[in-house]
Amino acid sequence: MSDVLTLADSQDRFLAETTWDRNVVVVAGAGTGKTTILVNRILNLLLREPNPLAITEIVALTFTNKAATEMKQRLRAQLLRLTEQADDMIDIFRTRYHLSAEQVGERARTALEQ
């Protein structure tokens, strides 16, 4: 089992990834994890229970094409990991949203197909 690094702003990151009653703006310097937060927020939107969103209902804005490409590549990689159901990441969503591994995998496959 790997050691998990706890960041001083981990609660703020969690809230940015899982707050649904308002829009979230992430402002931070280069290399601080903005893309990771955005990808995790999209994953939560796709997998949340109740009312998961279709990937076609999500808009994520970045300032550069490079950042948008990076976000798409990371999102695709994470969705593929979830379809394989062999990753600890799937347990996060199973626990958080009370889903079976099959439900998580199916939602990830649907997002990839869309």
Image (cartoon, grey):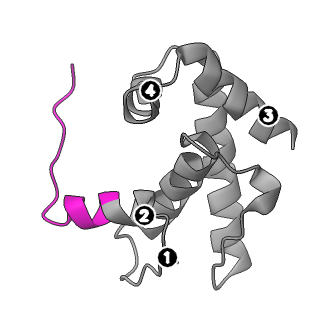
Closer to viewer: mark 2 or mark 3: 2
User: At x 73% / y 76%, what residue is drawn?
Assistant: 65
Outermost residue toward the right in this view: 114
Which residue is the site of mark 3?
110
How far is mark 2 from mark 3, CA to CA? 23 Å
Neighbour class for label 3 at 10 Å: few (<14), some, many (≥20)? some
Asked if the residue under mark 4 is in contact with the one under mark 1, i.e. CB atoms within 8 Å, the reply is no
Neighbour class for label 4 at 10 Å: few (<14), some, many (≥20)? some
Among the two numbered marks 1 and 4 on one chain, the one whose residue lies closer to the N terminus: 1
**Residue 58: x and y, percent?**
72, 63
Asked if the residue under mark 1 is in contact with the one under mark 3, i.e. CB atoms within 8 Å, the reply is no
Q: What amino acid is labelled 4 in the image?
A: His
Identify the element where label 1 is drawn.
Answer: loop
Among the two numbered marks 3 and 4 on one chain, the one whose residue lies closer to the N terminus: 4
**Residue 86: x and y, percent?**
51, 14
Asked if the residue under mark 2 is in contact with the one under mark 1, i.e. CB atoms within 8 Å, the reply is yes
Q: Is residue 85 visible?
A: no
Which residue is the site of mark 1?
22
Q: Quadrant of the C terminus?
A: top right
Quarter of the figure with residue 48: top right
Which residue is the site of mark 4?
98
Closer to viewer: mark 3 or mark 4: 4
Among the two numbered marks 2 and 4 on one chain, the one whose residue lies closer to the N terminus: 2
Identify the element where label 2 is drawn.
Answer: loop
Which residue is the site of mark 2?
19
How far is mark 1 from mark 2, CA to CA? 7 Å
The residue stretch that appears in magenta: 1-14
